């Protein structure tokens, strides 16, 4: 009971500091919530975009065309 009584008295004495700490904690919690909401929304948008616009690309190398370009003096060098 003594501990609870002292803690209550401490809260009453330091109202300004406790209110300021409460406001700071509230701002941090709100910022974290907004950040997580934005992150989840961005991940969802990226997933939907990838599903809707699936592009498959291939890179090929035409050796015949390359050999045709290097005929003559350039090929000897």
Image (cartoon, grey):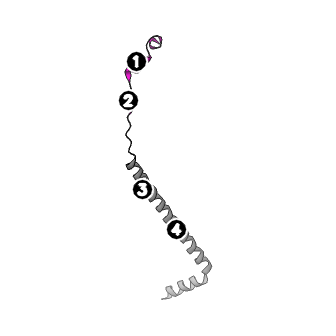
Question: How far across and down, in percent of the image, does residue 65 sit?
Answer: 40, 20
Considering only order in the chain, which callout, 2 or 1, is on the residue closer to the N terminus? 2
Query: Which residue is nearer to you in this view: 76 or 5?
Result: 76
Q: Which residue is mark 3?
A: 44
Question: How far across and down, in percent of the image, does residue 33 sit?
Answer: 48, 65
Question: How far across and down, in percent of the image, does residue 20 sit?
Answer: 60, 74
Segment tinted magenta in the rendering: 57-77
Q: Are marks 4 and 3 in contact (CB under 8 Å)?
A: no
Q: Which residue is mark 4?
A: 30
Q: CA distance from mark 4 to mark 2?
A: 51 Å
In the rendered structure, find residue 67 and report the number of the disc placed on it.
1
Query: Which residue is nearer to you in this view: 55 or 7?
Result: 55
Q: CA distance from mark 1 to mark 2?
A: 15 Å
Is 22 situated left or right of 42 in this image?
A: right
Q: CA distance from mark 1 to mark 3?
A: 48 Å
Q: Give SS at disc 4.
A: helix
Q: Give SS at disc 1.
A: helix
């Amino acid at each position: 009971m003594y501990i609870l009584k002292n803690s209550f008295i401490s809260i009453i004495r330091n109202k300004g500091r406790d209110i300021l700490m409460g406001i700071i904690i509230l701002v941090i919690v709100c910022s974290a919530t907004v950040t997580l909401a934005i992150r989840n929304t961005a991940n969802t948008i990226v997933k939907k975009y990838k599903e809707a616009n699936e592009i498959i690309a291939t890179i090929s190398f035409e050796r015949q065309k390359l050999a045709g370009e290097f005929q003559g003096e350039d090929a000897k060098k």
